[in-house]
Image (cartoon, rainbow, N blue to C red):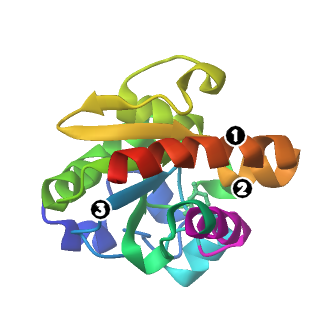
Amino acid sequence: MDIHSANECTRCALSQTRTTVVVGSGPLHAALIVIGEAPGKSEDEGGAPFIGRSGQLLFSLINEELKMNREDCYVTNVVKCRPPDNRTPLAPEIAACAPWLEAQRALWSGQVVLTLGLTAARVMTGSKAPMKDLHGIPVVRHNLTFVPTYHPAAALRQGPSVVAVMRADLAVVRGLLS
Ligand code: URA
């Protein structure tokens, strides 16, 4: 599927409540790809991924640990439209959106992917394990290396202990990029 037509997507019911299809941002040739769960309110209104509070924390950690900026990463989500009240996307929504992610994957030249939160970790690695067992452990699949970490929203809720784990997971990413 042509990723440009994602903007008109009606493959699932989220198309009825979204404001914007948040397809992705950044260069397709980025060395690092970042995948979250689904757009939140700020992203639905602004049309770009991780531009709200979670994104602020995420990119300050990426900047400190990897010396990279938002513009150096290709950033997207498993699901491209905001679920009402920011609920977790449902399995049929994830399945309906999967062809867009596949179309993006075909365009990436980078090989290292940071996944944020349990939804992205499970969809991208195929594992059903809990985050405590998934984070920081690279999984090779489809010629890409996925490093799961916690969602920055969890770090905003739970504080410094989650931030510390995310920093350690980003150090794994740093090793893979170097
Ligand atoms: N949370 C996500 O998972 N993705 C975004 O783009 C914003 C918040």
> In terms of secondary structure, where does tag 1 sit?
helix
Please rate how many residues cluster around mark 1, counting C-alpha atoms within 10 Å: few if below 14, some from 14 to 19, many from 20: some
Q: CA distance from mark 1 to mark 3?
A: 22 Å
Mark positioned earlier in the residue sequence (1 or 3): 3
Q: Is residue 18 above or below residue 171?
A: below
Magenta-colored stretch includes residue 11: no
Rendering coords of residue 40 (x, y %): 63, 63
Q: Quadrant of ligand 1?
A: bottom right
Q: Is residue 119 above or below residue 65?
A: above
Of the 4 image quadrants, the one containing the C terminus is bottom left
Mark positioned earlier in the residue sequence (1 or 2): 2
Please rate how many residues cluster around mark 2, counting C-alpha atoms within 10 Å: few if below 14, some from 14 to 19, many from 20: few
Kind of residue indicated by mark 3: Ala
Q: Is residue 175 above or below residue 48?
A: above
Q: Is residue 123 visible?
A: yes
Which of 128/93 is in front?
128
Q: CA distance from mark 3 to mark 2?
A: 33 Å
Bounds of the magenta segment: 51-63
Overall secondary structure of the magenta section: helix
Which residue is located at x 35 percent, y 28 percent? 139
Q: Mark number for residue 31?
A: 3
Which residue is located at x 59 percent, y 80 percent? 45
In the rendered image, which residue does mark 1 sit on?
Answer: 165
In the rendered image, which residue does mark 2 sit on?
Answer: 85
